[in-house]
Amino acid sequence: MENSGRDLLAHPVSLSGAAIATITGVLMTLLFAASMLGWEGSPYVGVVAYVILPTLLIMGLLLIPLGLMLARRRRARLPEGESLPPLPVVDLNKPHTRVLALGFLALTTVNVLLLAGASYKGLEVMDSPAFCGSCHSVMDPERTMHARSPHARVKCVECHIGPGASWFVKSKLSGAWQLVSVNLNLYPRPIPTPVKNLRPARDTCEQCHWPAKFVGDRLKVITRHADDAENTPLKTALLLHIGGQRGTKTRGIHWHVSEGVRVRYLSDPKREKIGAVELSDADGTRRTYEIKGDQPKNAQWREMDCVDCHNRPTHVYRLPAEEVDEAIEAGHIARTLPFVRREAIRALQVDYPTAEAARAGIKAQLAAFYAKLDPARASERLAAVDAAGTELGDIWARNVWPKMKIKWGTYPSLLGHEVVPGCFRCHDGEHASSDGRTISQDCDLCHQLMAQDEKDPAVLRQFAGR
């Protein structure tokens, strides 16, 4: 035991291992303490604290016995006539040996606790949105959209991985290749969609949302603004038949994923053109609806789930008109500025190489328009025009990412049918079964239109009690 103590200090390998283990242990303890006191730091601090430092600690601990073994071999090569040094004898009757043994046990316990805590925190850090979005320009767009989405407080892993060990392992293996592709600049721009290896939504989405819950009808009010000088607000009111399951019957939009119903479809890899739909109903009937003519190229069968309609449940990229209407409604853009909706949309649709260029260009374009529109009032509108330019610059920077080749409309939402076919991929009246039935395109099937682009809809006056 005494020889081992001397060897620990005498051989550079064991001495280095002891130094590394001691330093990393102290650093991990300090970072743990800081974390307990509420300090978070950047995601890179978490990587250092719970991934890199534990790795160094293990390396240091492994170097100690390696150094002891090398020191023993070195002593074995002593001049001829000297016997091979005996193995150390642990005699707990000696006070010095007891102190060393207890010290070794205490340090080992501390190291085990540090490694256990670091392993847990390491997984926690790697599962955080900050870590997932730390790949700079690659994930900046997705992280930005996640932060302003309805799922902003839901961790990335809860949707992209879900519960269970198997998908956790798959995600980490996939993440290893993603790390390589990011560092070697091998990733595509923009990131292609739909994601092929995404876990089925029934294993993830339905941890919180379940089809058996009856939702019924929901009133949705959409506010748009006219392109006139007053930017007149126009209201559209829809009664959405969301439905769900009540007793043994299911109705409404969510009928597609109700218990006992199975829908499969044959489509192109982008899932934009659907050639055939196979329905297995809860009552046991089975029917196939097909379009006339050729099927989509490279067609693939897929079982329908939540993301076939809710394809952008979190990372929602909007169009200029949507963003401007919302900003005017929220008061971030002054509706008192004549034609501000029309000019704002025009300014947003200009191509810029960077977000900085967009901010400057949008402000300049708005300022030039209002200076020309009414020179006498240009100065009094200056603050409102500048605020509108700032808001539009933020809108552009949230939705357009030149480095990732993301433009307006790169990632459309398939909910609805105004901008892209969406629902009409199947509900087009063209998909017919062998007995002549078609997938309905009836407007009232999913919603009831109660008002469309009206200044003061009667239905909303009724709800407001006016």
Image: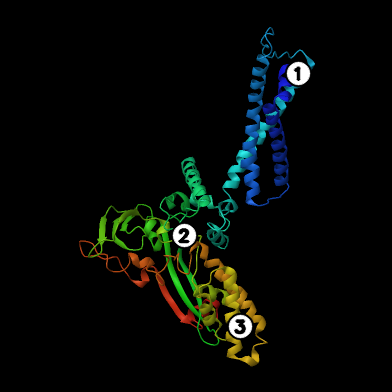
Residue 463, image x, y percentages: 52, 76
Q: Which residue is mark 2?
A: 189
Residues under labels 2 and 3: Cα distance?
34 Å
Q: Is residue 72 left or right of residue 171?
A: right
Q: Residues within 10 Å of mark 2 (few under 14, many from 20)?
A: few
Mark 3 or mark 1, which has the lower sequence index? 1
Residue 19, image x, y percentages: 71, 32
Q: Is residue 158 left or right of residue 424?
A: right
Q: Nearer the viewer, mark 3 or mark 1?
A: 3
Q: Amino acid at mark 3?
A: Ala
Q: Quadrant of residue 411?
A: bottom left
Q: Amino acid at mark 1?
A: Arg
Residue 138, image x, y percentages: 53, 57
Say which element carries label 2: loop
Say which element carries label 3: helix
Mark 2 or mark 1, which has the lower sequence index? 1
Mark 2 or mark 3, which has the lower sequence index? 2
Q: Residues within 10 Å of mark 3 (few under 14, many from 20)?
A: some
Residues under labels 2 and 1: Cα distance?
63 Å
Res 56 seen here: yes
Res 331 seen here: no
Q: Amino acid at mark 2?
A: Arg
Figure check: 6 above or below 363: above
Q: Which residue is mark 3?
A: 367
Residue sitting nearer the eye, 311 or 144: 144
Q: Which residue is mark 1?
A: 98
- Image quarter (top left, top right, bottom left or bottom right) of the C terminus: bottom right
Q: How many marks?
A: 3
In contact (CB < 8 Å): disc 3 and disc 1 = no
